[in-house]
Amino acid sequence: MKFIGQTIFYFLIIMALVYLYSYAGINNSGFIYNEF
């Protein structure tokens, strides 16, 4: 159960990062490409 909770926790963090990058990409289209 601990492994499942940890997986969900990291999944939420990754989704939050993707959401923030997507939101920043709308405001500044070159931001995402510069990060990577």
Image (cartoon, helix red, strand yellow):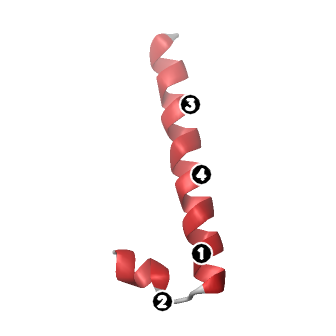
The residue that mark 1 highlights is 24
**21 versus 13 height, above or below:** below
User: Helix, strand, or loop for circle 3?
Assistant: helix
Mark 1–mark 2 distance (CA, rounded to whole Å): 9 Å
User: Helix, strand, or loop for circle 2?
Assistant: loop
- Disc 1 crowd, CA 10 A, few/some/many (<14, 14-19, 20+): some
The residue that mark 2 highlights is 30
Disc marking residue 8: 3
Tell us which disc is closer to us: 3 or 2.
Answer: 2
Identify the mark nearer the N-term, 1 or 4: 4
Q: Nearer the viewer, residue 3 or 9?
A: 9
- Disc 3 crowd, CA 10 A, few/some/many (<14, 14-19, 20+): few
Could you tell me the amino acid type at mark 3?
Ile
The answer to whether the residue labelled 4 contacts the one labelled 2, judged by CB atoms less than 8 Å apart, is no
Could you tell me the amino acid type at mark 4?
Ala
Mark 1–mark 4 distance (CA, rounded to whole Å): 12 Å
Say which residue appears at 59% left-offset and 63% top-offset: 20
Identify the mark nearer the N-term, 4 or 3: 3
Identify the mark nearer the N-term, 4 or 2: 4
- Disc 2 crowd, CA 10 A, few/some/many (<14, 14-19, 20+): few
- Disc 4 crowd, CA 10 A, few/some/many (<14, 14-19, 20+): few
Mark 3–mark 1 distance (CA, rounded to whole Å): 24 Å
Mark 4–mark 2 distance (CA, rounded to whole Å): 19 Å
Identify the mark nearer the N-term, 1 or 2: 1
Mark 3–mark 2 distance (CA, rounded to whole Å): 30 Å
User: Helix, strand, or loop for circle 4?
Assistant: helix
**16 versus 2 height, above or below:** below
